[in-house]
Image (cartoon, rainbow, N blue to C red):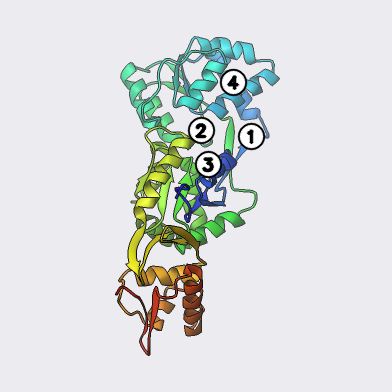
Amino acid sequence: MREELAGFTIGVTADRRRDELAALLERRGARVVLAPALRIVPLSDDTELREATRACLDQPPDILMANTGIGMRGWLEAAEGWGLAEPLRSVLASSYVVARGPKARGAIRAAGLHDQWSPASESCDEVVDHLRRRGVAGQVIAMQLHGERQPECTLALEAAGATVIEVPVYRWAPPSDPAPLHRLIDLIAGRLVDAVTFTSAPAAEALLRAAGDRTDALLTAFRNDVLASCVGAVTAEPLLRRGVPVSAPSRARLGALVRTIVDELPRRTVTFKAGGHLLTLRGHAAVIDGELRPLAPAPMAVLRALAQSPGRVLSRTALLRTLPRGADEHAVEMAVARLRAGLRAPRVVQTVVKRGYRLRVD
């Protein structure tokens, strides 16, 4: 198939650039579930940012730690509104500038400043290690925050003798409408999505926080069936700490993130022969003899259960356990009927009288 992700369902937890990411996935055939885990809220009260800016003018920083492109742009735009843009650029121009990633580097250069170093991993820990090796005792560091405070970085630099000015430019807040996020949590726990994308570590934390008493079910799904796909190593940290395997590109870009999903998801498919046909199971669809056949959750669940042991008979009671709660044995019969109709290949699923159903492998 030309559309590499046809038949797969992918959750998108990003807020900013979510439409861009969704378009990249849909262009490759994926079904996308949009469920922002967080939203970026510009500081409505600029008191803290103005105080941090004044502190930088009073104590010109020896080092500028630029964490994000949107944050650096927002800081300089706010300074422009206060008539402080030129004085701020002047003091920052004399600083040793560390750009944590390419977006921060782009914002620095767009402002006419020059960056001296960037970490290969784009992680705060690598920046701190670099600065401590370089020596920060007695120096002032302006740390443009990445949404939330980074106390571990601040404390490590202060312990090395630096004075740290934290510069808050924006903060994270829960989504305006939490319903899509809770729906995505249900889909993950029910294995009704094949992958979930994360473009920030706070979004991963927010998803797990929103899961509440379903957190264990969510983590189990991620560890066994649902691909957690992160834009980079920093984003992956909250999941890795909880034992979740993740896929992440070597370069933190949306295009690279999509390519890793294109590489990974098709490798997770199950292919087998039944009733004289070649079948491949893909998320919410089956590919039969090269033709994609989308299926509803119930018939897809039955097909997956039967495909675990082609040729083995599964009773109605066993198949009932694969269906949503509240279903009865009649629902199994309906799911099998819908499966046969959806595949358009009636010989694939065989009824074994008084015993149940199996995939025909002879």
Give the CA distance from mark 1 to mark 2.
12 Å
User: CB under 8 Å between callouts 4 and 2?
Assistant: no
Give the CA distance from mark 3 to mark 4.
38 Å
Give the CA distance from mark 1 to mark 4.
16 Å
Residue under numbered circle 1: 42
Amino acid at circle 4: Thr
User: CB under 8 Å between callouts 2 and 3?
Assistant: no
Give the CA distance from mark 2 to mark 3.
26 Å
Residue 53 image label: 4
Amino acid at circle 3: Leu
Disc 3 or disc 4, which is closer to the eye?
A: 3
Q: In this rendering, does residue 143 appear at all? A: no
Residue 12 horizontal side relative to residue 273, left or right: right
Is 326 rendered above or below residue 86? below
Residue under numbered circle 2: 146
Residue 24 image label: 3
Amino acid at circle 2: His
Q: Residues within 10 Å of mark 3 (few under 14, many from 20)?
A: some
Q: Is mark 1 on a helix, strand or loop?
A: strand
Amino acid at circle 1: Pro
| Image location of residue 207, percent across then percent down | 50, 51
| Image location of residue 274, percent across then percent down | 35, 70
**Label located before the other in sequence (4 or 2):** 4
Q: Residues within 10 Å of mark 2 (few under 14, many from 20)?
A: many
Between 330 and 99, the residue placed more toward the observer is 330
Residue 44 horizontal side relative to residue 260, left or right: right
**Label located before the other in sequence (3 or 4):** 3
Give the CA distance from mark 3 to mark 1.
27 Å
**Label located before the other in sequence (2 or 3):** 3
| Image location of residue 10, percent across then percent down | 49, 52
Give the CA distance from mark 4 to mark 2.
16 Å
